[in-house]
Amino acid sequence: MRDFAKDHSALALNTATLGHNVESQGAGWSPERVIDACAERGFGAITFWRREIGGRAVEIGERTRAAGLSVSGLCRSPFLVGPLAPPTRQAVLDDFHSSIDMAAGLKAACLTICVGGVVAGTHSMAESLKRVAEIIAEAAPYAAQSNVTLALEPLNPVYGGNRSCLVTVRDAVHLCETIGHSAIAIAVDVYHVWWDLSLGVELKRASAVRIAGYHLCDWLADTRDVLLDRGMMGDGVADLKALRRAVEEAGYTGPCEVEVFSVNNWWKRDPNDVLDICVERFKAVC
């Protein structure tokens, strides 16, 4: 395993950790201020959210690289199916293509895909995933043409109904194999996989070529909100060292991205303090 105590250049910030994924949350720092603050602390990369990029993808991507960082990802595609997805298939594809265009403008390492929940009336995870596969297969050539990797992120099973009918790494790898396109990979997020005892086996099935990202946080034993009460690394019950070992034994050597949704805790703090603690915890417990 890499020794983060001696070298934390693999540390990446997902700007959701500062509340940038939700309107009116956090301190409202500009992308430029986030870039500078991360560069000062030795972060290696940043993942942005679409809502903070707007029409400035090329500019922000260049600004990030000029500061010595890479763009580790863009969050995220639209939900592809289920109750939170755009109302028509064409609207889904149009927004999907727009998110691919933004990722390409940023020169992001990947675009995160949260697939959406169970399709109304089906009562079926399997049928919903079949429809997901059809949409991703249709979009994959456009992503490849744009030099964008689509990173399928399985979410914790608590989100199966509305946010993701893709809930295990096993099914994410199977979806990659089913679609069979080189532009498709997976993202592994501690919050969503910490409980999965089959993780190591499934990651080896994926291999390094199919792992596009690794996301850090913690699961609080007394979680009060399954969406917006994630823990900072070291504050919860996840075995962070074992999880990273499983990811790295599968061949992953890329950025480790701190992504903490925390409306009542971390988003209320001074971003400078949050970033300092990200560095400290990364070096000590990850």
Image (cartoon, rainbow, N blue to C red):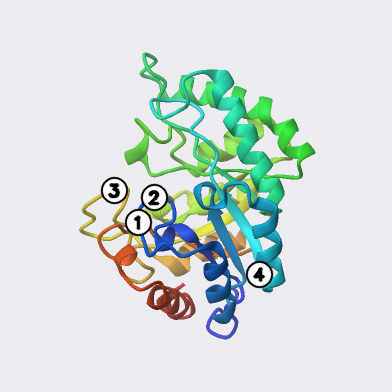
| Label 2, label 4: how far apart the Cα atoms are | 24 Å
Q: Is residue 79 visible?
A: yes
Mark nearer the N terminus (2 vs 4): 2
- Which residue is disc 1 drawn over? 25
Mark seen at residue 69: 4
Badge 2 density bin: few <14, some 14–19, many ≥20, Cα 10 Å: some
What distance separates the C-alpha of mark 1 from that of mark 3? 17 Å
Name the residue beneath numbered marker 2: 22
Q: Is residue 272 left or right of residue 177?
A: left
Q: Is tag 1's residue or tag 4's residue first in the polypeptide sequence?
A: 1
User: Quick check: 44 left or right of 145?
Assistant: left
Callout 2: helix, strand or loop? loop
Viewer-nearest of discs 1 and 3 = 1
Crowding at mark 3 (Cα within 10 Å: few <14, some 14-19, many 20+):
some
Q: Residue at x 41, y 49 (%)?
A: 192
- Mark 1 near mark 2, Cβ–Cβ under 8 Å? yes
For disc 1, the neighbor class at 10 Å (few under 14, some 14 to 19, many from 20) is some
Between the residue at mark 1 and the residue at mark 4, the CA separation in whole angstroms equals 25 Å
Marker disc for residue 226 = 3
**Quick one: 131 or 52, which is closer to the camera?**
52
Three-letter code for the amino acid on which mark 4 is drawn: Leu
Decide if residue 247 is on the left or right side of residue 221.
Answer: right
Q: The residue under label 1 is which amino acid type?
A: Gln
Pointers 1 and 4 in contact (CB under 8 A)? no
